[in-house]
Image (cartoon, grey):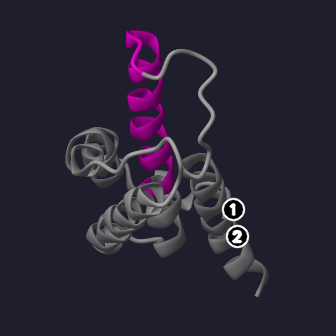
Amino acid sequence: MTKFLKLWLPVIIWAIVIFQFSGSSTAPIEPTSLLNIVIRKLAHISEYAFFFYLLARALQTRKYIPYALALAIFYAFTDETHQLFTPDRTASLTDVFFFDLIGMIPLWFILNRFPKLLKWYV
């Protein structure tokens, strides 16, 4: 049970963090400003790259990396759906198919090349 928690608790916590961020409707700067757009897109790239890494780490073997990618993409879709119901937010498939994958695909290649990264802190 302890190993299960070490592997899956970070995944669950990060999923909750993503859910909380996607439910946030307050923007400290002009929503259409270039700075706001860049910050939001970089957040998409990094948050889903990290989520994908946590999923791949929880599954623990290189052969399950495609499943981790599929789960991360599925969660990205649920995140965008959640944003449909959040005031002052919009959903965008571009976020899923472009920005989220920008973070996940290079990481997929890195994890395939260096599978020991999947065993980190287990």
**Are the residues at dot 1 and dot 2 in contact (C-beta closer than 8 Å)?**
yes
- Give the prevailing secondary structure in the magenta stretch: helix
As drawn, 93 above or below 34? below
Q: Name the residue carrying label 1.
A: 13
Magenta part of the protein: which range? 32-52
Disc 1, SS? helix
* Disc 2 crowd, CA 10 A, few/some/many (<14, 14-19, 20+): some
Q: Is residue 46 magenta?
A: yes
The amino acid pointed to by label 1 is Ile
- Between 74 and 122, the one nearer to me in the picture: 74
- Residue 95: x and y, percent? 29, 44
Q: Is residue 12 above or below residue 3?
A: above
Which residue is located at x 21 percent, y 42 percent? Answer: 98
From the image, tell me which residue sits under label 2.
9
Name the image quarter holding residue 70: bottom left
On screen, 9 above or below 16?
below
Helix, strand or loop at mark 2: helix
Q: Residue at x 39, y 37 (%)?
A: 45
* Residue 68 magenta: no
Q: Residue furthest top?
A: 34
Residue 80, image x, y percentages: 38, 57
Residue 16: x and y, percent? 65, 61
Quadrant of the snapshot with the C terminus: bottom right
- 3 with respect to 52 (left or right): right
